[in-house]
Image (tube, grey):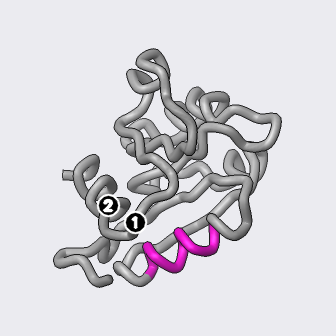
Amino acid sequence: EEVPGGLAGRRVLVVDDEPVIRRVIQRMLEHQGATVATAGNLNAARLLLTPAHDVVLLDQTLGRERGLDLLPDLRAAAPQTRVLFFSGEPVGPAEVSLVDGVVAKPVRGAALVDAIRQVLD
């Protein structure tokens, strides 16, 4: 569904190890006007880290990797970029304090767009 104000002009990096989730989220965000890049693991994500991204949607668990392990590189490469943990598991207070927000999986399109807009406003 279309969200008023959408995400036109916003650049989002989606880091998730599930190809289906990456595709669905990419389509959902592009439908709202965002430009979306995707990565399936931390190495691929590191190659895409740039200040050009407004938001990184970061899966908490990427196979054997932890999304948290990307944060130091991300903060160094793009200190202004907002980070939303994207997780199907509970996120502890220590982890919550390291990111700009948490989005629980599964997520509806409108809720995801709202969460992204909140961290950008």
Which residue is identified by label 1? 108
Magenta segment, prevailing SS (helix, strand or loop) = helix
Query: Going by the picture, which residue comes out furthest to the right?
Result: 64
Q: Quadrant of residue 66?
A: top right
Quick check: marks 2 and 1 in contact, CB under 8 Å? yes
x, y percent for residue 30: 45, 79
Tell me which residue sits at (51%, 31%) in the image. Answer: 90
Judged left or right of residue 97, residue 12 is right
Q: Which mark is residue 59?
A: none
Tell me which residue sits at (79%, 42%) in the image. Answer: 63
x, y percent for residue 24: 57, 74
- Range of the magenta residues? 22-30
Mark 2 lies on a secondary structure that is helix
**Mark 2 surroundings: few (<14), some (14-19) or many (≥20) residues within 10 A:** few
User: Is residue 97 placed above or below 5 in the rendered structure?
Assistant: above
Amino acid type indicated by mark 1? Arg
Q: CA distance from mark 2 to mark 1?
A: 5 Å
x, y percent for residue 4: 17, 78
Judged left or right of residue 16, residue 81 is left
User: Is residue 88 placed above or below 33 in the rendered structure?
Assistant: above
Q: Which mark is residue 111?
A: 2
x, y percent for residue 101: 36, 39
Q: Is residue 117 magenta?
A: no
User: Is residue 84 placed above or below 110 in the rendered structure?
Assistant: above
**Mark 1 surroundings: few (<14), some (14-19) or many (≥20) residues within 10 A:** few
Q: Quadrant of residue 81?
A: top left
Mark 1 lies on a secondary structure that is loop
Number of marks in the rendered image: 2
Tell me which residue sits at (32%, 83%) in the image. Answer: 1
